[in-house]
Image: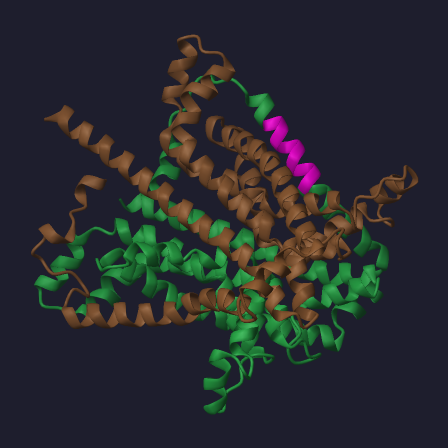
């Protein structure tokens, strides 16, 4: 498929939109809109964070409540990512390596967290595990509190981020097929050996990408978390909730200082994504080159 | 991606040699039941408990109905905007080489990577009366922040990547032959685009717009900061759920949430069926 694609440099035939003025106009409009809609807001976050000077910026970051919010956010992400990593790999393995009735339904169910409003997601958990819910009231009798406490935050974060890993893995594993793995089994590999030596190297980059996306969303989730957190300052406030609190408290510079940390995580996410895509492209090119040499 | 999906499905049935079916399927089913289905049962039970009259009274309340209208209109306008902007971005990224193309490509995903609350306070600050954009708009007599237009803006921002990322792969795999034939026969750029390229793109474009619409319906974090949240004017439905919760009116929150949930599930299933159909058609033709 990739061989039929020729780069525009080698091609003399003009394609649609290749005339210089159309090209210039379209690129110009795109860059202008992107600058207004994406670049300026990104710069504004950092500009607003430093509007009262660097000292104020760093002081607001080391405030006790801010530090606590940072810590809680990291804990939530650290618990969420491994749970969804295991689930994502299991689900992808089940739906791409086996045929069973209800396979398509399972894949659609997995997409539900993407379609559901985060506020509704939070509400679902509050109804079930809150003190009035049928599991929550039983837990209350056992003196276990999940909602308005950190376990509830982790639970809703797991919910909203659960499709990411599976979504990255499924198309790739479907495309790669099962031949490699079947050969390994016939050669006597055990289940774990099979996964570690054959499957994992093939899906490594997609897996990392899925983890990065899960992490980005886990760190930044707002709607669902704000329903179940109870917004207790210095206790159940994650960083995005802390941003809201500071902003509504008319501490705009402090709010943007906290927001700048989240923006840096977002930028890092984009950077890692670009790096992974570059690696994947390179390995595809190397493979194509090898194949070409073999066929010649 | 399309062809791989169908290729796997039409593959002759293998004898099952790979291990881990019961482990992987068992874990997945358990996880989905615990994480997804069990919590949804709580909502159904809460709504059934209410009784039909009270349920209907809550979901047809004037203020709530106004919020449906605001949410639907804003999501519609935002996704239409993204249809145009996303198509343009995808086209420019696939068809042209220019300095900064890779940066632009990476930047497209910013709205997905940036926490919605951060997007919300940033947009609210930029478009407020004394903000960078707000000042310019004010001099033109326009007001965006704290009006329904602010909602459209926030929804459009958070769902920019959907259309780009669904159209981009289709555009990349488009074969140049038909297009070149049209050009050789002397047809104009615009008519080749309209007759040859657009028909191939539009299923992906529609999927992207539908995804963008679904996401916009549920958006909360980015919207509430810029909306102004005035009853009957700029309250979104997610906020109505949130307000009911803050008043500890769980039944009302559940009733409104059940409407939102049903709408998004219907949209999700419709998108999935539509996608499966056009993928099959695409595969059948090639």
Q: Position of residue B260 (x, y in %)?
A: 66, 61
Describe the colour scheme in one phrase. by chain
Residue lying at 18% horizontally and 40% vertically, measured from the top left: A3
Which tint was used for chain A? Answer: brown
Q: Position of residue A182 (x, y in %)?
A: 41, 17
Residue lying at 45% horizontally and 66% vertically, measured from the top left: A43
Give the quarter of the image for residue B124: bottom right
The residue nearer to you, when weighing B105 against A248, is: A248
Question: Where B156 sits versus A105, above or below?
Answer: below
Question: Where B111 sits versus A74, above or below?
Answer: below
The residue nearer to you, when weighing B229 against B186, is: B229
Q: Position of residue B102 (x, y in %)?
A: 30, 54
**How many circles with numbers are drawn on the protein?**
0
Residue lying at 53% horizontally and 67% vertically, measured from the top left: A50
Q: Residue furthest front?
A: A55
Question: Where B125 sits versus B51, above or below?
Answer: below
Residue lying at 32% horizontally and 43% vertically, measured from the top left: B283
B146 part of magenta stretch: no
Q: Is residue B217 visible?
A: no
Which stretch is magenta? B25-35
Could you tell me which quadrant the N terminus of chain A lies in?
A: top left
Q: Is A113 left, or right, of A133 in this rendering?
A: left
The residue nearer to you, when weighing B119 against B55, is: B119
- Name the main secondary structure of what is drawn in magenta: helix
B30 part of magenta stretch: yes
Which tint was used for chain B? Answer: green
Q: Is B86 left, or right, of B67 in this rendering?
A: left
Q: Is residue B137 visible?
A: yes
Q: Is B163 left, or right, of A253 in this rendering?
A: left
Could you tell me which quadrant the C terminus of chain A lies in?
A: top left
The residue nearer to you, when weighing B11 against B264, is: B264
């Amino acid at each position: 498929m990739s061989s039929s694609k020729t780069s525009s440099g080698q091609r003399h035939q003009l394609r649609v939109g290749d005339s210089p003025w159309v090209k210039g106009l379209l690129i110009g409009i795109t860059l202008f809109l992107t600058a207004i809609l994406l670049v300026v807001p990104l710069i504004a976050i950092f500009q607003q964070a430093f509007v009262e000077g660097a000292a104020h910026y760093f002081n607001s970051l080391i405030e006790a409540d801010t530090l606590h919010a940072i810590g809680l956010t990291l804990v939530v992400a650290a618990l969420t990512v491994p749970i969804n990593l295991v689930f994502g790999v299991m689900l992808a393995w089940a739906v791409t390596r086996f045929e069973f009735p209800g396979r398509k339904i399972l894949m659609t169910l997995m997409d539900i967290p993407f379609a559901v409003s985060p506020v509704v997601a939070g509400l679902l958990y509050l109804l079930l595990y809150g003190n009035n819910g049928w599991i929550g009231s039983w837990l209350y009798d056992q003196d276990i509190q999940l909602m308005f406490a950190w376990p509830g935050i982790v639970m809703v974060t797991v919910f909203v981020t659960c499709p990411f890993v599976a979504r990255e893995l499924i198309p790739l594993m479907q495309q790669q097929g099962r031949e490699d793995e079947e050969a390994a089994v016939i050669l006597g590999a055990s289940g774990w050996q099979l996964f570690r030596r054959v499957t994992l190297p093939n899906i490594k980059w997609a897996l990392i990408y899925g983890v990065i996306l899960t992490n980005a969303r886990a760190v930044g989730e707002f709607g669902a978390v704000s329903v179940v957190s109870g917004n207790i300052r210095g206790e159940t406030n994650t960083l995005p909730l802390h941003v809201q609190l500071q902003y509504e408290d008319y501490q705009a510079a402090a709010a943007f200082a906290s927001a700048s940390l989240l923006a840096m995580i977002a930028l890092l996410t984009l950077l890692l994504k670009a790096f992974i895509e570059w690696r994947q492209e390179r390995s595809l090119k190397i493979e194509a080159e090898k194949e070409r040499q073999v066929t010649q | 991606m399309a062809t791989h999906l169908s290729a796997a499905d039409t593959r002759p049935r293998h004898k099952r040699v790979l291990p881990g079916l019961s482990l992987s399927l068992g874990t997945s089913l358990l996880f989905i039941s615990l994480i997804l289905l069990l919590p949804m049962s709580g909502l159904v039970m809460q709504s059934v408990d209410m009784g039909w009259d009270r349920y209907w009274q809550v979901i047809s309340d004037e203020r709530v109905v106004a919020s449906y209208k605001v949410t639907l209109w804003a999501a519609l306008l935002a996704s239409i905007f993204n249809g145009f902007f996303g198509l343009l971005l995808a086209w420019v990224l696939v068809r042209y080489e220019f300095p900064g193309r890779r940066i632009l490509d990476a930047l497209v995903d910013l709205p997905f990577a940036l926490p919605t609350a951060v997007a919300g306070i940033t947009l609210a600050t930029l478009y407020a009366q004394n903000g960078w954009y707000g000042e310019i708009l004010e001099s033109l007599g326009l007001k965006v922040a704290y009006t329904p237009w602010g909602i459209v803006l926030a929804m459009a921002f958070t769902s920019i990547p959907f259309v780009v990322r669904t159209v981009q792969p289709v555009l990349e795999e488009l074969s140049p032959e038909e297009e070149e034939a049209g050009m050789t026969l002397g047809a104009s750029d615009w008519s080749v685009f309209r007759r040859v390229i657009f028909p191939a793109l539009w299923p992906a474009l529609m999927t992207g717009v539908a995804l963008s619409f679904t996401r916009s319906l549920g958006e909360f974090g980015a919207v509430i900061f810029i909306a102004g949240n005035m009853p009957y004017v700029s309250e979104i439905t997610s906020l109505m759920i949130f307000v009911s919760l803050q008043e500890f009116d769980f039944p009302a929150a559940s009733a409104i949430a059940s409407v939102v949930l049903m709408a998004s599930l219907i949209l999700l299933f419709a998108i999935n069926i539509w996608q499966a159909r056009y993928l099959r058609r695409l595969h059948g033709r090639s």
